[in-house]
Amino acid sequence: MLPDSVKVFTGRAEAVDINRAPGCTPIVIHGLSFAQPHAPESLLGRYKPAIEGAVNIGVLHTSLGGALGHDLYSPCTIADLTATGFRYWALGHVHKRSVVEGACAIVMPGMPQGRDINEAGPKSVTLVTIEDDRSIHIEERTTSIAQFECVLVDANGIEDWRELVSAISRALERKRSEVSSDHLVARVRIDAHVLQSEVAIRCQSGEYLQMHRSREVFTVPHRGKFCDARRDPVLPVLV
C-alpha cells in the first residue's frame, strides 16, 4: 500500500496539478507509464501540452538516444524534450548521470547505488529546487554506501612476492583515500609484461593475499567469488 502522496501513472498521459497555497506559482507534473514492457517508439507525443502560466515538470522513462548496456525505451532527443515547453524533465532508465541546464533543465540522475563492477564510480541522487521566480537549482547528493572501482597495479619490474603485496596495498590505500563512500569495493588488476617466476606462479594460481582491513570491503575478482575483508581478511588477485 502506497501513501496518498505517491502518484502512480497509468498508460494514459496525465497532468497533475500540485496543490499549493494561494499566490504561489502553480506546478503541474506530467507523466505516463508504459502500457507494454517495451517502448521502442517515443512516448513524448502522448504527453499533454504544457499548461500556460505553470511550471511544467515532465517525468519520463527513456533511453534518450541510446546507451550502452541499456534496452531501448521511449527514445527521444534533448531537442525533443526542450520543444515540449516544460521547465524541467526528470528522466530515468540510464544508470549514468547526465545534466542539461538551460530554459529546459533535463536530469538523468543515474542511480543511488552501484550494483557491480560494471557500475563503478560514485553514485548519487539529484535534488532539484524550483523557486517561485521559476529558476532551478540542481544539486547532486552522493548516496552510495559502497563504491565499485577498478584498481590497476603496476607490477613491472617486481621480482619478489612481498613487494607485489606491498604494491597492491599501496594502490588500494590510494584509491580508498579518493572514495567518499563508506566502503570501497575494488577489482584488482595486475599490469605486467613479464612477471618473475615466483610471482607469476602465485598470481596465476589465484593464491590469496593476506590483507587485513577494518573498514574496506574488497571484491574478489576470482571465479566470481566475493570476500568481505571484515569477515574473511583475504584478497584473491586477478591477473
Image (cartoon, helix red, strand yellow):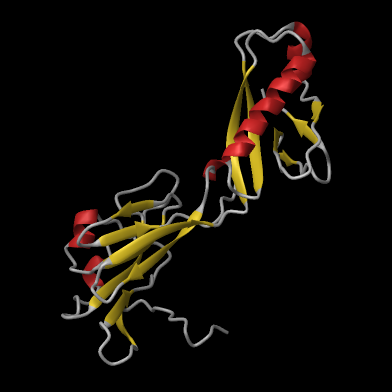
**233 with respect to 45 (left or right):** right
Q: Quadrant of residue 174?
A: top right
**118 with respect to 27 (left or right):** right
Q: Quadrant of the N terminus?
A: bottom right
Q: Quadrant of residue 143?
A: bottom right
Residue at the location (71% across, 42% down)?
216
- How many numbered marks are there? 0
In the image, residue 173 sits, relative to residue 226, either above or below, namely: above
Residue 9 percent coordinates (x, y): 39, 78
- Does any portion of residue 201 appear in the rendered image? no
Residue 76 percent coordinates (x, y): 26, 56
Q: Quadrant of the C terminus?
A: top right
- Does any portion of residue 188 appear in the rendered image? yes
Residue at the location (53% across, 57% down)?
112
Residue at the location (30% across, 56% down)?
75
**100 with respect to 207 (left or right):** left
Most extreme residue toward the bottom is 22
218 or 25, which lies in front? Answer: 25
Residue 41 percent coordinates (x, y): 28, 60
In the image, residue 99 sits, relative to residue 16, either above or below, namely: above
